Image (cartoon, rainbow, N blue to C red):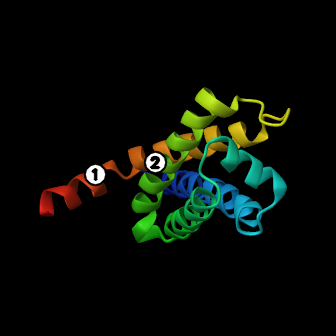
Amino acid sequence: MNIRNINIRNVTIWILRLVPAIILLQTLYFKFTAQPESVKLFTEIGMEPYGRIGTGVLELIAAILLVIPRLTHYGAILGLILMTGALYFHLTKLGIYFDGDALLFSYAVITFLCCALLILAYRSQLASQLRRK
């Protein structure tokens, strides 16, 4: 493996870390300040206010873990779990176009894919940690 391949891999990994971290952090404002859109969404799925605040806290933790290289795999797992829930509610209760806009669904898909790719990239590290326990 030459230096160029290593640099491309590092840049790709950092993009896969930063994109979901930024998305997760950006949506926190709406959750933590009880913006009407966020309150409406969590009311529709029957999880207002505890689901909104709890999800926000977990998303903050996931975003932090994603940008710490030795903890990225934990952030990716948490992010994947959270986005699985978000996608479930979009596909069963909220619809893809929540309030006439597919932005939240798109963010969930992007975050899900980035986290899944990070888990794939860190699979050997995850496997070695599981063997130790």
Q: Residue at x 40, y 44 (%)?
A: 120
Instruction: Indicate whether 76 appears above or below 132.
Output: above
Report the disc number at residue 124: 1
Question: Which quarter of the rendered picture does the C terminus lie within?
Answer: bottom left
Q: CA distance from mark 1 to mark 2?
A: 20 Å
Q: Residue at x 49, y 68 (%)?
A: 65
Given this view, does label 1 or label 2 mark the residue nearer the observer? 2
Q: In this image, 24 relative to 54: left or right?
A: right
Report the disc number at residue 59: none
Q: Residue at x 59, y 28 (%)?
A: 92
Q: In this image, 113 relative to 94: left or right?
A: left
Q: Position of residue 127 (x, y in %)?
A: 23, 52
Label 2, on which residue?
A: 81
Instruction: Indicate whether 116 appears above or below 78.
Output: above
Instruction: Indicate whether 28 appears above or below 119.
Output: below
Q: Position of residue 48 (x, y in %)?
A: 64, 55
- Secondary structure category for the residue under label 1: helix
- Secondary structure category for the residue under label 2: helix
Amino acid residing under circle 1: Ser
Q: Residue at x 41, y 68 (%)?
A: 71
Q: Position of residue 108 (x, y in %)?
A: 63, 42
Residue at the right extreme of this rendering: 100
Q: Position of residue 50 (x, y in %)?
A: 58, 61
Among the two numbered marks 1 and 2 on one chain, the one whose residue lies closer to the N terminus = 2
